[in-house]
Image: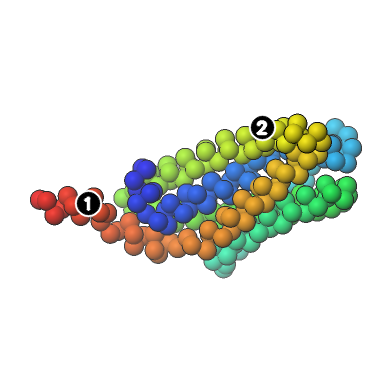
């Protein structure tokens, strides 16, 4: 599995792309509600609604993306989602500086919409970036990237926030720094997406690797 990914430039790029994208999106899972309480003094009842609002817009975006699939190129739809989620993080950081809950909810809405579009498009790309004889191999590799991103997102969302809060002595700073890092990760993923080409991936997988060429030459 490792050689199949590292030996294919497009496959390697997609692996890193998925890691950055999912670590950023999944890293906010444990942050939005406590951030709402810390930054805006929201009650427990109000903070529990944050995830519901986010989830509602994720679902709405998934439905819309499903209807648009086939009409809009997958990479374009994925980029719309990536940039939407990126904008969401930027707006959430802005809400922390301005202490505006209305700006915060706007950021949550953008984050939800971006996540939904990104989910549909990137799942389609995952299946496109396979080959007929190695579907399980590549889907397994993308699954490994997913699992690694979940771990990284949890560490980023927990340990990094706590470390920054302790260093600065201001709890809110921990949230803002992490949201800022997640925005940068999404920016990096958006740049990498432009280098992911399904046709190039399949061409590279159809060509024998250097090791295979050496083996054939020695026969």
Tell me where residue 211 appears, x and y as whole percent.
23, 50
In the image, 123: left or right of 41?
A: left
Tell me where residue 76 appears, x and y as whole percent.
57, 65
Residue located 62% across and 56% down the image? 187
Q: Nearer the viewer, residue 110 or 86?
A: 86
Secondary structure found at label 2? helix
Tell me where residue 210 appears, x and y as whole percent.
25, 54
In the image, 74: left or right of 138?
A: right
Tell me where residue 135 appears, x and y as whole percent.
37, 48
Q: Which quarter of the image is occupied by the N terminus? A: top left
Residue furthest out toward the left: 219
Which one is earlier in the sequence, the residue at label 1 or at label 2?
A: 2
Q: In this view, does 160 lie above or below 84?
A: above
Q: In this view, does 80 lie above or below 136?
A: below
Q: Nearer the viewer, residue 60 or 150?
A: 150
**Residue under numbered circle 2:** 159
Residue located 37% across and 54% down the image? 8
Residue 38 badge: none
**Residue under numbered circle 1:** 212
| Res 53 seen here | yes
How packed is label 1: few (under 14 Cα within 10 Å), some, or many (20 or more)?
few
Secondary structure found at label 1? helix
Residue located 68% across and 58% down the image? 84
């Amino acid at each position: 599995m490792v050689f199949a990914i590292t030996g294919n430039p497009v496959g390697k790029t997609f692996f890193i792309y998925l890691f950055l994208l999912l670590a950023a999106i999944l890293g906010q899972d444990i942050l939005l509600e406590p951030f709402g309480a810390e930054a805006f003094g929201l009650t427990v009842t109000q903070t529990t609604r944050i995830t519901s609002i986010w989830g509602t817009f994720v679902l709405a975006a998934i439905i819309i993306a499903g209807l648009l699939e086939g009409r809009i190129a997958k990479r374009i739809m994925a980029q719309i989602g990536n940039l939407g989620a990126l904008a969401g993080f930027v707006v959430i950081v802005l809400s922390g500086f301005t202490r505006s809950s209305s700006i915060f909810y706007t950021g949550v809405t953008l984050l939800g919409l971006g996540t939904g579009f990104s989910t549909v498009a990137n799942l389609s790309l995952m299946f496109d970036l396979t080959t007929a004889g190695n579907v399980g191999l590549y889907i397994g590799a993308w699954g490994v990237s997913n699992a690694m991103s979940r771990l990284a997102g949890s560490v980023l969302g927990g340990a990094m926030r706590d470390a920054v809060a302790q260093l600065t002595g201001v709890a809110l700073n921990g949230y803002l720094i992490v949201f800022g890092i997640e925005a940068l990760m999404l920016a990096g993923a958006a740049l990498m997406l432009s280098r992911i080409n399904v046709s190039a991936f399949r061409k590279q997988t159809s060509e024998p690797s250097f090791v295979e060429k050496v083996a054939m030459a020695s026969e």
